[in-house]
Image (spheres, rainbow, N blue to C red):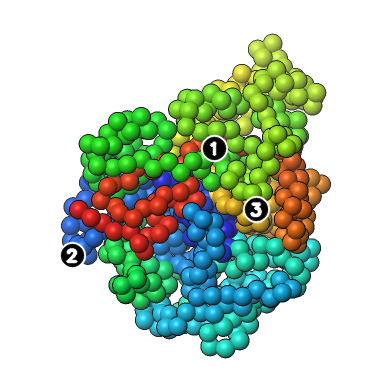
Amino acid sequence: MIIKKTEAASPPFLTPASCLLPPASCLLRRCLTLLLALLCTVSFSACSLSPLETEAAQGPKLVSGILSDPKTFNYALSQESPNVFVLTSEGLITENPITGKKEPALAQSWTISQDKLKIEFTLREGLKWSDGEPLTVDDVIFTYNDIYLNEAIPTDARDILRVGQSRKLPTVRQLDRRRVEFTVPEPFAPFLDSVGLPILPAHSLREFVENKDAEGKPQFLSIWGVDTPPEQIVVNGPYQIESYLTNQRIIFRRNPYYWRQDEQGNQQPYIERIIWQIVESQDTSLLQFRSGGLDYIGVSPEYFSLLKRQEEQGNFQINNGGPAYGTTFISFNLNQGSRNGKPLVNPIKSRWFNTVEFRQAVAYGIDRYTMINNTFRGLGELQNSPISIQSPYYLTPEDGLPVYEYNPDKARELLLSAGFQYNPQEQLLDAEGNPVRFVLITNAGNKTREAMAAQIKRDLGKIGIQVDLNPIAFGTLVDKLSNTLDWECHLLGFTGGNEPHNGSNVWSVEGGLHSFNQKPQAGQPAITGRKVADWEQEISDLYITAAQELDEEKRKELYGETQRLTQEYLPMIYLVNPLSLAAVRDRLQGVEYSALGGVTWNIHELRIED
């Protein structure tokens, strides 16, 4: 799975690793906790019901919601979750979120060579795209060689495909009309996990990869944006985009050429249409779910007790998938570079942020137990690692993972040891007498994150730090983190999964989601003076070494060391891991809910029974 940014802290319809990300699962179709997968709550506006009563909306339909508009319909350029690709795209293989096993998708089978350097896939017979054109090995070759492995295209997918210290990429070649072979230059433990990326249509996109715009860049970089007419977007997943109205809704309809059939030979999926309503408020989603307008929502902690009492009369059931995959954290902008002669971060604040004692003091200064009890109503647990606790590579505190229990006295002690000081009003000042004050951004409309941010402001105020909260639109937040790099501190989330390597786009110093010290992406203005810390490079190198290691116990040790380093140096200060909860109408049959897969991971099997 490719880790992706999530707009919600506690996903409602979770996207499986097989959908959010690339590995044998497809993340993440792993950001930013991401997730898997993963949304916080879905919403639906009553005023938008009537337009749905059209011929296009007749037949079985599933209605849910998202908090913001999609950013792109081009998978290779997507960094966010939720995204449409969970419904529209498939790869060669996928991951079953219940069993954790790799399963066939577009490929009916695969074999791994004895030396572990080659994987041979055999495509299913008769595959087609949503426009009826054949889906062949040529599409697989095009997708990898011309898009994912093409250095001219800035895609996060490439981060998880790089092998070894050399950062070499796999080679992909056709064996015959149905067989394709992937080869890596050296042993690569997550090899199979790295080849589940969605396959894209060569007949629709090749010309845009080959042709350049006025600036000499591939036209592909501007193709399939959200302004593209839906009929021009060719897909291979269970659904295709039928229509999209900005700030209103996305409607998906069944792909008539989707490959899956049930045991009786019936075409899947069974549900004719899926509707994602786009609204700005979790409160609205709750009201519309209670009134019957939504088929499922993610259950945030503040709504759990209310909804639990109404399960029987409301004809729905709350599903509990256990601790959510993914992470929620605050992070400081550690980039010390300049763009166009102007520092990305105020040099005074940059010195604070790049002082490890400052970051550790902030970690000690946040009362996460109170956050669990108040914001999460007890429906969560402390989070201390970038690796999901369900992963076999998770390092427990008992085995040496550093943790930061709430300790404001320890926080003050660290700050004073680092040269900070307090004035008579108990305000924190740096060594030059500058008041310590920064702006914390998070995505507006996400009540859980806004409540977490408000508590962080209060908690840090108790150790003399002034925090200015600035909730902003999710799209604006992503632009700041990915493009302008104009931010000081953010509260965000990444999707998650079982395989740590799928987070290499976060931890590689060259990674597309290395957001705390982001290098400029392709086509962006250059940055001068960017510095990479020794610990930062060590984590990046350890991810490479762990991917080369085939011995599972040694891999665990290596990933354990990455977790010790991330917790010591705190490029991200992890907060709370909520329970993965979703309320699902009884009319939606076939749901097999899990924290990794959510409600709709097996969308092809779900039915609506009124």
* Residue type indicated by callout 2: Glu
Q: Quadrant of residue 301?
A: top left
Distance of mark 3 from mark 2, alpha carbons?
46 Å
Relative to 178, say whether 369 is above or below: above
Q: Quadrant of residue 231?
A: bottom left
* Earlier sequence position, callout 3 versus callout 2: 2
Near mark 3 (Cα within 10 A), the count class, few <14, some 14-19 or many ≥20, is many
Left or right of residue 594, residue 557 in this image: right
Closer to the camera, 344 or 481? 481
- Residue at the spot 55% in from the left edge and 33% down from the top edge: 381
Closer to the camera, 426 or 61? 61
Residue corresponding to mark 1: 577
Near mark 2 (Cα within 10 A), the count class, few <14, some 14-19 or many ≥20, is few
Left or right of residue 171, residue 480 in this image: left
Residue corresponding to mark 2: 55
* Residue type indicated by callout 1: Asn
Distance of mark 1 from mark 3, alpha carbons?
17 Å
Closer to the camera, 468 or 7? 7
Residue 277: in sight, yes or no? no
Furthest-front residue in this view: 263
- Residue at the spot 70% in from the left edge and 62% down from the top edge: 189
List x then y, in percent, for residue 315. Answer: 24, 42
Residue corresponding to mark 3: 500
Relative to 181, say whether 160 is above or below: above
List x then y, in percent, for residue 604. Answer: 36, 64
